[in-house]
Image (cartoon, grey):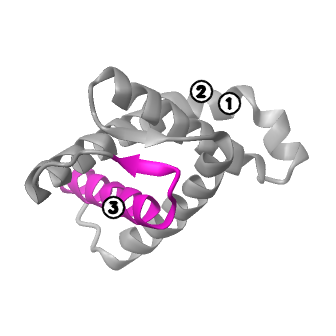
Amino acid sequence: MTNFVVKTLANAAALAVAIWLLAGITLDDQSSLGRRTLSLILVALVFGLVNLIVKPVVKFFSLPLFILTLGLFTLVVNALMLMLTSWLAKQLDLSFHVDSFWTALLGGLIISVVSWAVNMALPDKD
């Protein structure tokens, strides 16, 4: 359970950095800081579920592309997962939005680096 909370908070922090750095990734909730934080955590949960359920399937079916590009296709898969998260957030009436594939590609890279750094800094209890 602790690992789930840590990963969700790491995702939320990484998403917050991407939102802060890129104009094409937005969290349009104009309400209080608490409401924005809740929206960000809910988006992080959706992002975590997408990465848990959908990403392994996509990686399996695109394995030849991973081999051919020596793993660089991971950037494309991460961008697609971020765009799927944006679409799901819209369906769930969350205010998270990613404008384009190229923004998602850069955002996926930022999220990967920040999430890795946060996970390295936080203790792993499990």
- Which quarter of the image is occupied by the C terminus? bottom left
Q: Is residue 54 magenta?
A: no
Residue 96's quadrant in the figure? top left
Disc nearer the start of the sequence (2/3):
3
Q: Which mark is residue 57?
A: 2
Picture layout, residue 106 above or below residue 61 = below
Report, in whole angstroms, how far the alpha carbon at label 1 lies from the one at label 3. Answer: 25 Å
Q: Which residues are magenta?
A: 1-27
Residue type marked 1 = Phe
Picture layout, residue 63 above or below residue 124 = above
Whether residue 1 appears in this view of the structure is no
Identity of the residue furthest to the right in this view: 68
Q: Position of residue 100 (x, y in %)?
A: 62, 40
Neighbourhood count class around disc 2 (C-alpha, 10 Å): few under 14, some 14–19, many 20 upward: few
Q: Secondary structure at mark 3?
A: helix
Query: Which is more toward the observer, 116 or 88?
Result: 88
In the rendered structure, the answer to whether residue 110 lies left or right of residue 88 reads: right
Q: Mostly what secondary structure, the magenta segment?
A: helix
Q: Position of residue 38 (x, y in %)?
A: 16, 48
Q: Position of residue 110 (x, y in %)?
A: 54, 63
Q: Secondary structure at mark 1?
A: helix
Q: Which mark is residue 10?
A: 3
Q: Mark 1 near mark 3, Cβ–Cβ under 8 Å?
A: no
Q: Which residue is mark 1?
A: 60
Residue type marked 3 = Ala
- For image coordinates 77% across by 35% down, the residue present is 63
- For image coordinates 40% across by 49% down, the residue present is 26
Residue 124's quadrant in the figure? bottom left
Q: Secondary structure at mark 2?
A: helix
In the rendered structure, the answer to whether residue 34 lies left or right of residue 9 reads: left
Foreground tag (1 vs 3): 3
Identity of the residue furthest to the front in this view: 30
